[in-house]
Image (spheres, rainbow, N blue to C red):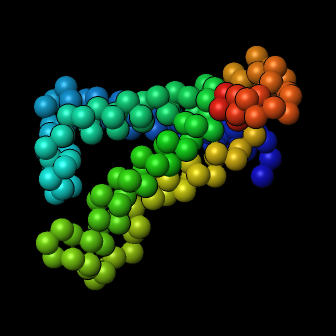
Amino acid sequence: MSIRTYSAMRVIFGAVFLLDGTFKWILFQQGTMQATVQSFGYAVLSDNWMLFGALVALGETAGGLAMIVGLFQRPAAMWSATIMFSIWVAGGFGGAYTLGTGWSFAGYTDPGGDLMLALAFSVLVFSPYAYSLASRLKLRDRWSGTSLREKVLRFVVT
């Protein structure tokens, strides 16, 4: 794929994630976040619904912004993939597993949008940083040395 295609994917999936994060904050505003988190059926989630809801909302909002702007895009893509994969697993692998009844593959053909987003963000971890704020500010050039510190900074910021 071309660098422009990767950059467009980064911005589009960042926008999707930012929108998704915004919807989470709306759930808090409407008072439905507790029911949403508790619908997963796990006691640890139900008992700490506000913490998990806020962490997911913050992670999605910050991840979307970072992907759109192109600053901290690799860590943002990694945590975005982790969030979506965790939601997919907690939700019963896209609906194939229900707590109490077990596995049910009858009519199961959709692995779920959460898994698809997790895979897209996994690819974006390795996308080039062109057409981003990091490339505009030439941040990669500032840490062009070979020391471990500079390599880590270069990876995290770009």
Rendered position, 123 above or below 73: below
> Does residue 70 appear in this view?
no
Quadrant into which the C terminus falls? top right
| Position of residue 60 in the picture relative to residue 4 (left or right) | left
Residue sitting at 18 percent across and 56 percent down? Answer: 42
Residue 136 found in image quarter: top right
> Does residue 14 appear in this view?
yes
Q: Position of residue 68 (x, y in %)?
A: 58, 29
> Foreground residue, 77 or 14?
77
| Position of residue 109 in the picture relative to residue 37 (left or right) | right
Q: Total marks drawn?
A: 0
> Foreground residue, 23 or 61?
61
| Position of residue 100 in the picture relative to residue 132 (left or right) | left
Residue sitting at 20 percent across and 47 percent down? Answer: 45
Q: Position of residue 92 (x, y in %)?
A: 29, 65
> Foreground residue, 145 or 138?
145
Q: Position of residue 73 (x, y in %)?
A: 62, 34
Residue sitting at 29 percent across and 59 percent down? Answer: 91
Residue lying at the far bottom of the rendered structure: 106
Rendered position, 104 above or below 135: below
> Foreground residue, 22 or 57?
57
Q: Position of residue 39 (x, y in %)?
A: 16, 53
Residue sitting at 26 percent across and 78 percent down? Answer: 103
